[in-house]
């Protein structure tokens, strides 16, 4: 391709969405995109949830010839969480090596049996069944039932998903987000790390354990992060930044407690801290005032709009007010 064409493509703000929609992926790439082990991806294919959209012949000189590798649509992979909502994808992603895939207990589907009722269409779209009934009544291009009865019609899942996408009833999920960590060990050493597809699990009780997990770039980063958190008092997250949340500084005692390598070679680590340390979580606000509005994460205040000067927030301390109620997990 001409360099100017490449440069023009690289400048597009919607490039991640284009890649998610149009780039064909091999089995290992597909597993990494979905965030599962290669064994789990093989079950996704066996269950009929996705089908190859093409193949490519790859010559392996050390393996005696040419191997035909199936290619899968990145869009189909990105939509799996949406169009198969009954699957516990989070549990599948957290299955440890050597464990039987949770997908093995599910029933395979074929193109002529992969149908959905109006209630499931509503679940895919995140709406009520009445809304889907209304769409069907108002839009003449709504998919025609392929089975079922007049009262309980059944629709082809692929046709329904295509219609929902075309009419902006669902959107193509972007790639997994990332969190940025600036960590300080108890000896003063610091390090900056990136966690892909971060997941924050908050304990229900102040005596419990909070967890933060995500995929790291390689073993070098994992070793460096573990070394920083190996001191007597663990490590402190000088800055934790994740999509949808304000930057947060967390006190010490944060430790690496688990390293999990997926079948596709990715390395996921888990950090833990006592839940009582939320009392010491300091929102990094721009102004000296701490009278911001409440954010979606308890213990963190949004940035004041009027004061743009540098400053720091004030930590909540035990005894000042009860620990706020919070959900079991926040993504």
Image (spheres, rainbow, N blue to C red):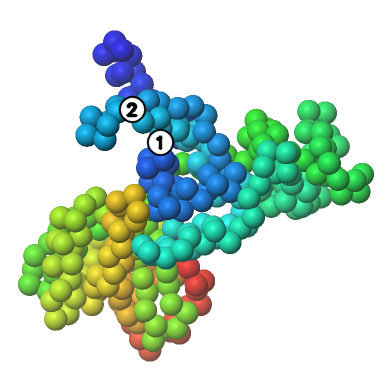
The image shows residue 286 at horizontal and vertical percentages of 30, 56
State the residue position of label 2: 66
Q: Is residue 284 left or right of residue 203?
A: left
The image shows residue 46 at horizontal and vertical percentages of 55, 47
User: Which quadrant of the rendered structure holds the N terminus?
Assistant: top left
SS at mark 1 in the image: loop
The image shows residue 146 at horizontal and vertical percentages of 81, 37
Q: In the depicted view, which residue is nearer to us: 251 or 293?
A: 251
Residue for point 42% across, 69% down: 201
The residue positioned farthest toward the right in the image shown? 150
The image shows residue 124 at horizontal and vertical percentages of 66, 48
Residue for point 78% across, 33% down: 142
Q: Residues within 10 Å of mark 1 (few under 14, many from 20)?
A: some
Q: Quadrant of residue 289?
A: bottom left
Height in image: 77 above or below 216? above
User: How many marks are shown on the rendered structure?
Assistant: 2
Q: In the depicted view, which residue is nearer to us: 331 or 76?
A: 76
SS at mark 2 in the image: strand
Q: In the depicted view, which residue is nearer to us: 91 or 2?
A: 91
Q: In the depicted view, which residue is nearer to us: 301 or 323?
A: 323
Q: Is residue 315 left or right of residue 189?
A: right
State the residue position of label 1: 26
**Residue 301 seen by the camera:** no
Height in image: 115 above or below 8? below
Mark linked to residue 84: none
């Amino acid at each position: 391709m001409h360099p100017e064409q490449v440069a023009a493509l690289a400048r597009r703000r919607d490039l991640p969405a284009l890649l998610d929609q149009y780039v064909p992926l091999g089995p290992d790439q597909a597993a990494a995109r979905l965030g599962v082990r290669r064994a789990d991806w093989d079950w996704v294919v066996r269950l009929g949830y996705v089908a190859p959209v093409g193949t490519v012949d790859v010559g392996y000189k050390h393996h005696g010839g040419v191997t035909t590798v199936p290619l899968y649509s990145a869009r189909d992979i990105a939509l799996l969480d949406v169009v198969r909502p009954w699957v516990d994808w989070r549990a599948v992603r957290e299955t440890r090596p050597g464990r039987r895939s949770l997908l093995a207990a599910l029933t395979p589907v074929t193109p002529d049996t992969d149908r959905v009722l109006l209630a499931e269409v509503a679940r895919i779209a995140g709406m009520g069944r009445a809304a889907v009934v209304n769409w069907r009544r108002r839009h003449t291009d709504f998919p025609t039932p392929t089975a079922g009865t007049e009262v309980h019609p059944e629709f082809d899942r692929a046709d329904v998903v295509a219609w929902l996408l075309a009419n902006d009833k669902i959107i193509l999920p972007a790639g997994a987000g990332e969190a940025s960590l600036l960590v300080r060990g108890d000896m003063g050493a610091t390090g900056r790390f990136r966690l892909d597809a971060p997941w924050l699990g908050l304990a229900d009780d102040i005596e419990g354990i909070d967890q933060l997990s995500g995929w790291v770039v390689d073993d070098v980063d994992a070793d460096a992060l573990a070394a920083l958190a190996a001191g007597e008092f663990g490590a402190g997250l000088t800055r934790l930044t994740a999509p949808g949340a304000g930057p947060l500084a967390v006190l010490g005692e944060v430790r690496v407690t688990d390293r999990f390598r997926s079948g596709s070679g990715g390395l996921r680590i888990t950090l833990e801290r006592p839940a009582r340390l939320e009392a010491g979580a300091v929102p990094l606000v721009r102004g000296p005032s701490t009278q911001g509005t409440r954010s979606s994460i308890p213990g963190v205040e949004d940035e004041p709009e009027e004061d743009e000067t540098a400053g720091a927030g004030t930590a909540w301390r035990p005894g000042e007010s009860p620990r706020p109620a919070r959900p079991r997990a926040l993504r």
